[in-house]
Image (tube, rainbow, N blue to C red):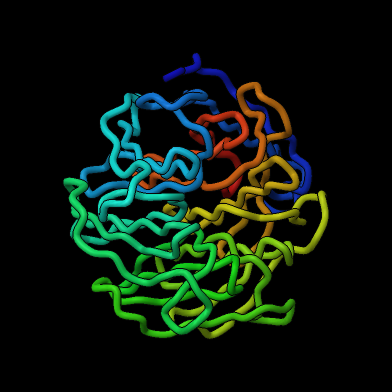
Amino acid sequence: MRIATTWTVLLTAVGLMNSVSSPGSAAELRFEHVMNIGSAGSGEGQFKYIEDFAFSKDGHLLVTDAAHAFVQKFDKTTGRFLSRFGGKGDDDAHLDKPEGIAVDPDGNIFIADYNTGYVKKYDAAHTWLLTFSEYGSGKGQNMKSEFMDIRNGRLYMPEAGNHRVNVFDLDGNFLFDFGGLGNGPGQMNNPESAKFSSDGKLYVADLKNDRIQMFDAEGKFLTSFGMTGTNPGELKAPAGIALDAKDNVYVTEIGNDRVQVFDRDGKYLTQFGQAGSGNGEFGNLHGIIVDKNTNWVYVADTANNRIQVFKPKHSGNF
């Protein structure tokens, strides 16, 4: 495990003057780099292909590693490795390519396996409880499952292979799906993540359509934001989504090597990051999560085999 010394990423104020401050006022927002967690390798606390995050019931950071098939647990404050479970194998408790992860109010952990189509449920002590779904395109099946979320007793799982979101209850029973291949409102092309706001809106990263779509809990399309490009507010292969305590929406972009932040309605607020391997630089970004108690931001810097952790310094109305 590698932990960096603290330093500050200065974000340029491109596009901020009209979005978070009044004309003529300072429009500067800094994210302070707190630490890096992990390094390349197969040992405890090391990574090969980080995918997504969740917080355990006891407040630790859970991380999926698709290549090593482990789910690893870290102290979210210090970055210290605590434990791991899963790993390659054929037994019920093993995994093949874990990507999506979500934790229910009881602390049960749900893992979506990209290759097998299985969704596996573990208790808070990492003991396997249940396997449901399977690889395919039928109702209740999934193909290339991605980053998911839980709300009001339902698991919402996007599928890049079937271009839809599957919805299950927490006992693994299929309820319904929505989406379908296309670029019209409510249609999807490789949805990568589906995460809820505090008021029940589901934000879906529609990766190959370069946009974020918003739905209600029943799968009704509400609106979308973003378009293809590199300018502030534009997107290129959006992947991970996270929401902070104010329901600001953080989006990682594989194509632009940056994190953009929008308000709950999709209005651009700011961005940070660029391609590279230094602190505040990224490669092949995937999942992201915000601790709503501290506002610390955990970013899957997948190409660099690490998690980068930031904390914001607020400016304007952000």
Percent position of residue 304, x then y: 60, 29
Q: Residue at x 61, y 73 (%)?
A: 163
Task: Name the image quarter holding residue 301.
Answer: top right
Q: Is residue 311 left or right of residue 207?
A: left
Q: Is residue 257 left or right of residue 36?
A: right
Between 217 and 249, which is closer to the camera in this rendering? Answer: 217
Please, which residue is most extreme toward the front here?
Answer: 90
Between 147 and 94, which is closer to the camera in this rendering? Answer: 94
Q: Residue at x 37, y 43 (%)?
A: 88
Give the answer, above or below, for where 184 lies relative to 159: below
Q: Is residue 276 left or right of residue 65?
A: right
Give the answer, above or below, for where 197 lies relative to 280: below
Q: Residue at x 46, y 52 (%)?
A: 99
Give the answer, above or below, for where 105 lies relative to 275: below
Please, which residue is most extreme toward the top here?
Answer: 5
Give the answer, above or below, for where 219 lies relative to 250: below
Number of numbered labels in the structure image: 0
Q: Quadrant of the N terminus?
A: top left
Q: Residue at x 50, y 63 (%)?
A: 145
Percent position of residue 112, x then y: 41, 59
Percent position of residue 122, x then y: 23, 55
Between 291 and 23, which is closer to the camera in this rendering? Answer: 291
Percent position of residue 29, x then y: 63, 36
